[in-house]
Amino acid sequence: MVKYILKRLGVAFLVALTVSMITFSLFYVSGDPAVALAGEAASNEEIEHIRKSYGYDRPIPVQYMDWLGRALQGDLGRSHYLKEDISHVILTRLPNTLILAGCAIAFALTLSIPLGVAAAIRPNSLIDRFALTLAVVGQALPSFWFALIMMFFLGIQLRWLPISRVETWQGFIMPAIALGYYVTPGVMRLTRAGMLEVLQSDYIRTAKAKGLRPLTVLFKHALRNAIIPVVSLAAVQFGFMLGGSIVIESIFAINGLGFLAWETIQRGDLPMMQAIVLVLSLFYILITFLADMLNAFLDPRIRVT
């Protein structure tokens, strides 16, 4: 197990290093950052002054090492638009995004896994048709449209839930459902397919022949093996929710990283955009690593690969 953990940590480190290089290169994707900061009407003297002030006249490898060293110390620079420390701004917005993504993935797993298991136990039954219909609707219905429908009926007509802001926990209900429902079909279908395959295995028939209780066979033996690909998919989807919550956060006016990313793109704030991409990428790497560890715990065969 220790060897497997070290191997996965090595892979995570290399991926993080590659992500840092790609993130740093965002400064130069749109051209000279000094020109972007100075504006189109700036003179050559002003552009040169900005280039020297921000250190853009140094060799790119030197700039990268300096930026990486400061990032490792928690210094992500200063926003050109907000005139604030980027680390402080991100730490202020990050909790809302984490809570939203956590609630959304919890809703998706709570809905999809039981439905997938029930559909696999009784294939071609009414519950199976209902689960597949729910999956088709979830994939066909855009998340922003579903969010607007919930806002109209639950927020405006019935006044059950707040339609914007997240001062209370009720403010996360509709955003979490809108964000999580889009993920539900994929997880449900994968759970159903995995359970159908596992339930036909020889060891499941052996467990039934030994007289084990049906619930023990279902949850201890069948679901434990069928859930392994679901864990990997859930980790990927959680990372998607962290970075893909821009629309939902904009609709519900949630001050999270997604909404901050949208504001940053509009303002052309390159350092802030760079920091958001780096933070979300590192979270994605961490979630993937934790999913690998959970899969290794569920299936010891993975540890020797």
Image (spheres, helix red, strand yellow):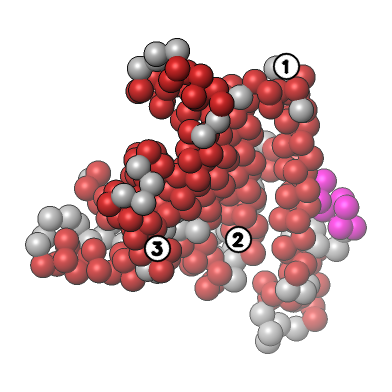
Q: Amino acid at mark 2?
A: Met
Please name whichever residue, 21 or 72, is drawn nearer the observer in this view of the structure.
21
Q: Circle 1 is placed at which residue position?
A: 2
How many labels were placed on the picture? 3
Instruction: Tell me where residue 7 sits by quadrant.
Output: top right
Q: Amino acid at mark 3?
A: Val
* First in sequence: mark 1 vs mark 3: 1
Residue 166 numbered tag? none
Instruction: Tell me where residue 41 sits by quadrant.
Output: bottom right
Residue 136 numbered tag? 3
Say few, some or many: other residues with alpha carbon within 10 Å of mark 3 (under 14 / 14 to 19 / 20 or more): few
Disc 1 to disc 3, C-alpha distance: 42 Å
Disc 2 to disc 1, C-alpha distance: 37 Å
Q: Circle 2 is placed at which residue position?
A: 273
Above or below for 249 versus 281: below
What is the magenta range? 59-66
* First in sequence: mark 3 vs mark 2: 3
Say few, some or many: other residues with alpha carbon within 10 Å of mark 1 (under 14 / 14 to 19 / 20 or more): few
Location of residue 199 in the rendering, given as x and y in whole percent from the top left corner: 48, 33
Q: Is residue 287 within the magenta segment?
A: no
Q: Residue at x 46, y 50 (%)?
A: 189
Give the main secondary structure of the magenta stretch. helix
Element marked by disc 3: helix
Of badges 3 and 2, the one in the foreground is 3
Please name whichever residue, 90 or 3, is drawn nearer the observer in this view of the structure.
3
Location of residue 284 in the rendering, given as x and y in whole percent from the top left corner: 60, 44
Q: Residue at x 77, y 60 (%)?
A: 25
Of badges 2 and 1, the one in the foreground is 1
Q: Is residue 61 within the magenta segment?
A: yes
Above or below for 7 versus 250: above
